[in-house]
Image (cartoon, rainbow, N blue to C red):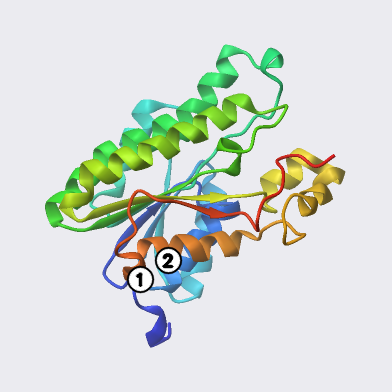
Amino acid sequence: MNAGTTVLHGRTALVTGATSGIGKAVARKLARQGAYVVLHGRDHVRGAALVKEIETEGGSARFVAADLADADDTLRLAAEAGAVDILVNSAGLYEFAPTAASDAASFDRQVAVNTRAPFLLVGALAPGMAERGHGSIVIVGSSAARMPAPVGAAYAASKAGAEILTRYWATEFGRSGVRVNTVSPGPVRTEGTKAMLGEHVAMLDRTNARGRAGDPREIAEVVSFLVGEASSYVNGAVLFADGGELSALPS
């Protein structure tokens, strides 16, 4: 690990949803910067593979499996993570369907993972950060919270809820040295979006002024900025990282 990549040395980070997509890119980025990373996911095999990958690159990490749709399991994750300096809520669940085709169970799952899990993790971990006088929390939101579409209302509501919580937490913990911010990505090419859209994944490239979908590593760079000292005066912000979004769903 190069000297210039140790800016987070001595810090411990918990990254949820770390075994794929944006979460994986964030975990690798923070580990490269010297943080000890607690990786969350549900798949032990993928978790072990990522730990090995990070260690091969000179970083340090461990994996904790948990189901964020379960409140008790979410609190267990917080307990097993221990004292952390950085919390990145990257895990997300999206079920893009029209409202009439979404049942109560689908709505509850999305709110549980996208809104309640960050709420419980912040409630469990932020007081310790405040007691130590420093900490950074980042929510990985979504442009769906501000760009209406004919499908995905439940998902959008769950992400909008997380954005509101960001502002409340920034106010609640800011005077104690804990900063809370959201990065709001536009469409990003991940395993999840490819699986959801299949052969139509190319339409993501028509949703913004850059003319292409984002890469998870680009979002990880924004998260890195938000947890680092360069953003020390940024608190309660929702930072758009969407390439200059034009529309939620192109025709």
Residue nearest the viewer, comparing 150 with 117: 150
* Numbered mark located on residue 10 in the image: none
Label 1: few (<14), some or many (≥20) within 10 Å? few
Residue 250, placed above or below residue 87: above
Amino acid type at mark 1: Ala
The percent coordinates of residue 237 (x first, y second) are: 40, 51
Query: Residue most toward the bottom?
Result: 3
Q: Residue at x 82, y 48 (%)?
A: 203
Residue 171 visible in this rendered orientation of the protein: yes
Q: Nearer the viewer, residue 224 or 20?
A: 224
Left or right: residue 250 compared with residue 37: right
| Label 2 environment density (alpha carbons within 10 Å; few <14, some 14–19, many ≥20) | some
Nearer to the camera, 34 or 52:
34
Q: Residue at x 30, y 65 (%)?
A: 232
Picture quadrant where residue 205 is located: bottom right
Q: In this orientation, which residue lies closer to the viewer: 184 or 190?
A: 184
Question: Considering only vertical position in the picture, is 165 above or below 243?
Answer: above
Where is residue 121 drawn, in percent x and y?
Answer: 33, 39
Tag 2 residue = 225
Q: Secondary structure at mark 2?
A: helix
Mark 2 residue type: Phe
Is label 2 in contact with label 1 (beta carbons under 8 Å)? Answer: yes
Q: Position of residue 46 (x, y in %)?
A: 57, 52
Secondary structure under tag 1 reads helix
